Image: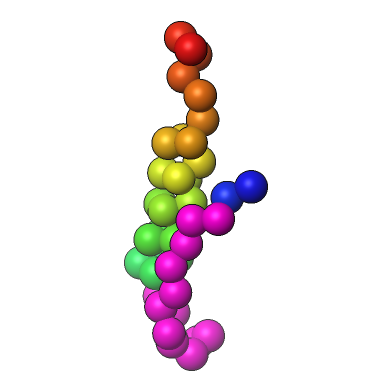
Amino acid sequence: MNSAGFFIPKAFLDYEGADYDAYLELAMSAFFLTQPSPEA
């Protein structure tokens, strides 16, 4: 389960591509940082 996140208070139609990129970057970073190392 991925519970990392943040909220940018905007109307739905005011979101831009950069906002979605930031959400995706955080979600992907959190996923990879929480996975065990192959050497462990």
Q: Up-down: is 15 above or below 3? A: below
| Residue 8 within the segment the image draws in magenta | yes
Q: Which region shows up in magenta?
A: 3-16
Q: Up-down: is 8 above or below 27? A: below
Q: Is residue 34 found left or right of 19 in the rendered image?
A: right
Relative depth, front residue between 28 and 21: 28
The image quadrant of residue 3 is bottom right
Q: Residue visible at 48% across and 36% down? A: 34
The image quadrant of residue 23 is bottom left
Q: Up-down: is 13 above or below 32? A: below
Q: Residue visible at 51% across and 24% down? A: 36
- Percent x, y for residue 27? 48, 51
- Percent x, y for residue 7? 44, 74
Q: Residue visible at 57% across and 50% down? A: 2
Q: Residue furthest top?
A: 39
Question: What kind of colouring is applied to the model shown?
Answer: rainbow
Q: Residue furthest bottom?
A: 11
Q: Residue furthest front?
A: 40
- Percent x, y for residue 39? 46, 9
How many marks can you see?
0
Q: Is residue 2 found left or right of 34 in the rendered image?
A: right
For the stretch drawn in magenta, the main secondary structure is loop
Q: Residue visible at 43% across and 87% down? A: 10
- Percent x, y for residue 22? 38, 61
| Residue 33 within the segment the image draws in magenta | no
